[in-house]
Amino acid sequence: MSALMDISSIASLINVAMLSVILALYGRIYGKTRATFTIGLMFFAGMLMLHNIIGVYGYFAMAPLYSEALLPYFVGVHFAEMAGIAALLRVTVRPM
């Protein structure tokens, strides 16, 4: 596997870790408030987590099928997603 594929995999695993924290926080919030909006946020975070888990699996299972030219774009997508998830985690933990 190339270094860029490794970087994408690590970024996806970090995303999964942050999303796990977000899901736990949303679960706690839902337990206190029973707000249906929180269920939607949990679904959204769960789908993002599924996307990252499938991405990591795809990188390892189908690594020879990926073109080297695509790998920088995958890294960009995962880092952009990481920035968005980090911002979501930040406003969830410390609302402004």
Image (tube, helix red, strand yellow):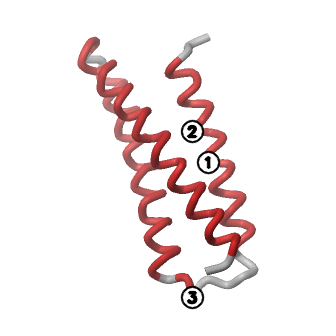
As measured in the structure, the alpha-carbon distance from the residue carrying label 3 to the one carrying label 2 is: 28 Å
Q: Is residue 45 above or below residue 76?
A: above
The residue that appears at 28% across and 12% down in the rendered structure is 33
In what element is the residue under mark 1?
helix
- In the rendered image, residue 93, in percent from the top left (x then y), is placed at 51, 19
Q: Is residue 49 above or below residue 7?
A: above
Give the mark, 1 or 3, whose residue is nearer the N terminus.
3
- At label 2, which amino acid type do we have? Ile
- In the rendered image, residue 7, in percent from the top left (x then y), is placed at 65, 63
As measured in the structure, the alpha-carbon distance from the residue carrying label 1 to the one carrying label 3 is: 23 Å
As measured in the structure, the alpha-carbon distance from the residue carrying label 2 to the one carrying label 1 is: 6 Å
Dot 2 and dot 1 residues touching (CB under 8 Å)? yes
Assess disc 1: are there few (<14), some (14-19) or many (≥20) residues with their C-alpha within 10 Å of its C-alpha: some
Dot 1 and dot 3 residues touching (CB under 8 Å)? no
The residue that appears at 40% across and 49% down in the rendered structure is 47
Q: Is residue 84 above or below residue 96?
A: below
Q: Which residue is mark 2?
A: 85
- At label 3, which amino acid type do we have? Leu
Q: Is residue 9 above or below residue 95?
A: below
Q: Which residue is mark 3?
A: 65
User: Looking at this view, is 29 or 11 the one in front?
Assistant: 11
Q: Quadrant of residue 31?
A: top left
In what element is the residue under mark 2?
helix
The residue that appears at 66% across and 65% down in the rendered structure is 74
- At label 1, which amino acid type do we have? Glu
